[in-house]
Amino acid sequence: MRIRIQLPGAELARVRFAISPVYETVMALAALIRPGVHAVHLPWVRWAGPRLSTVEHLPLLRALVGRDGFKPGFLMPAPTSRLPDLDDELRAVRATSPADARDDTARLTSKPARRFHDDPRAGLPLVAAALRQCHDLVVAPHWDRMVRLLDADIAFRARALATGGFEHLFTDLHGDVAWTGEELIVHPRQSPSTTVSVRGHGLVLCPSVFCWPRVTASTNPPTVGTLRYPARGVATLWESVEPAPQALANLIGRTRAAILARLATPQTTSGLAAGLGITAGAVSQHLAVLKEAGLVATHREGRTTLHLRTERATTLLA
């Protein structure tokens, strides 16, 4: 379906970015149910699948999120801040009115979904509890890395807005997003078409890990509209880090060699510290030496400082 989000001049002032932990949890489950749709996450799928056997009410949750191309809107409330707490978002899920929950699940036909539809007041706490369990088991272990990647995407988009305006920001989000000057069009080559008015509430742009490779938008937002798109560099999340050659470790030290091995993709100081199991201060000292040797370059993406190895370092690792 083509989605036309109306954004006249005043609405552009209300466009903001946010990250949603509950949305990532919902879409992580979708990736587990239909891994072929989200193939870039297959390394994570192989790790995560066996870990959900203890989740209570998992069949209900799977029945609600398992349909390809459709997820009940009440499971994915629009973020109220840049990075809301998962418990706050789950409170919003539990607070869904029975009428809205029935509307959102009317098209679902499985037995667990129909039981939920018949008594959403009883089902909503079960759904929220299951989402919390799923997040703790298969999303939380990777959450810090995910947030760093999503923050880096937001910083990149903010710079695009500063240098090229809203047209550059919107048209670079995804191949299925177009901008007319007053409307943001999602899936412009599809039909039929529906028009979304955010009615003075604005639009939240949410980079996502698990929505890859698709872009989605709310079609009937109760307040603020949402557009969720795949963050840049999602595939790097699950890449295994090749160990540095022993000869290089002998030359410059095991920790510095490990840092260079991890800097095939941009990393923050705290991310390197977490991955290596050492303090951020120790990482900073090693980075200073590596930068002085011309092996690491550092640049800022908004408020985030990212490090990347240079071509000289890549040659040493070869």
Image (cartoon, grey):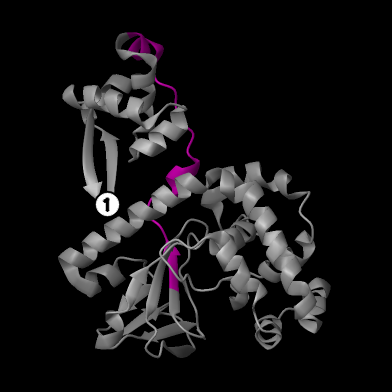
Q: Position of residue 176 (x, y in %)?
A: 39, 72
Residue that mark 1 sits on: 303
Q: Position of residue 47 (x, y in %)?
A: 64, 41
> Residue at horizontal 49%, vertical 34%?
240
Q: Would you place residue 126 above or below residue 190 in this image?
A: above
Residue 233 part of the magenta-drawn span: yes
> Residue at horizontal 23%, vertical 63%?
160
Q: Position of residue 267 (x, y in %)?
A: 35, 39
Can the viewer see residue 284 in this picture? yes
> Residue at horizontal 41%, vertical 87%?
198
Quadrant, the C terminus: top left
Name the residue nearer the viewer: 212 or 281: 281
Residue range highlighted in magenta: 227-250
Local secondary structure at mark 1: loop
Q: Position of residue 118 (x, y in %)?
A: 81, 83
Crowd class of label 1 (few under 14; some 14 to 19; many from 20; radius 10 Å):
few
> Residue at horizontal 79%, vertical 61%?
57
